[in-house]
Amino acid sequence: MNQKAIRAKLEGKLAEDDFNSVKKAVAEEISQIETEIKALDSESSTMDDLLRQAEVQAVDLAGAWQEGNVNQRHELAMAFFPEGLAYSHERRFFEPCNTVITEMVWRFLDRVGNVGVPDGI
């Protein structure tokens, strides 16, 4: 658009006021595009920062459980099961107090079969 306006101006087909209007509109559009590019660059760098932060903060929960002392394990359990874990005499296992979720897990495990090593241990 800018090139066509310049050619028309040079050929005398475009008045000075019209040329200035086109030039102003093109400059505004360029400014808007540059602003949008900066915003996209900012979002991109923010996403990169968030990904780097997530990598730094990633925690090996299984490792934390294995290496943790009693207090650390208690904190992990309470983070995942804020209502606590109750001992099930029927299953001889600690499980969440929320029986709906517990039943869903047990039904899933029954469908899947043995989990872990081939003998189910």
Image (cartoon, helix red, strand yellow):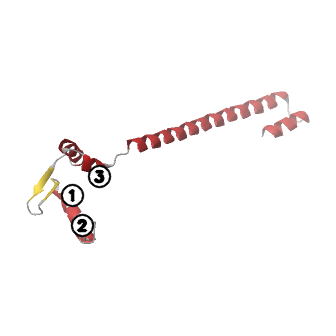
Task: Write down the residue under mark 2.
Answer: 109
Separation (CA) of disc 3 from disc 1: 21 Å
Q: Earlier in the sequence, mark 2 or mark 3?
A: 3
Within the image, what quadrant is residue 108 found in?
bottom left
Can you say whether 95 is above or below 5 in the image?
below
Q: Residues within 10 Å of mark 1 (few under 14, many from 20)?
A: few
Can you say whether 105 is above or below 7 in the image?
below
In front of the other: 43 or 80? 80
Q: For the residues labelled 3 and 1, say whether their Cβ atoms are less than 8 Å apart.
A: no
Residue at x-position 42% and y-position 44%: 55
Mark 2 vs mark 1: give the one in front: 2
Where does residue 31 sit, x and y in percent of width and height? 67, 32
Where does residue 17 sit, x and y in percent of width and height? 81, 27
Q: Earlier in the sequence, mark 3 or mark 1?
A: 3
SS type, badge 2: helix
In the image, is 88 to the left or to the right of 8? left
In front of the other: 42 or 119? 119
Residue at x-position 12% and y-position 53%: 86
Mark 2: amino acid:
Leu
Residue at x-position 81% and y-position 31%: 19
Mark 3: amino acid:
Ala
Task: Write down the residue under mark 3.
Answer: 62
The residue positioned farthest toward the right in the image shown: 11
Quadrant including the N terminus: top right
Task: Write down the residue under mark 1.
Answer: 101
Mark 1: amino acid:
Ile
In the image, is 29 to the left or to the right of 80? right
Separation (CA) of disc 2 from disc 1: 12 Å
The residue positioned farthest toward the front in the image shown: 67
Where does residue 11 sit, x and y in percent of width and height? 91, 36
Mark 2 vs mark 3: give the one in front: 3
Quadrant including the C terminus: bottom left
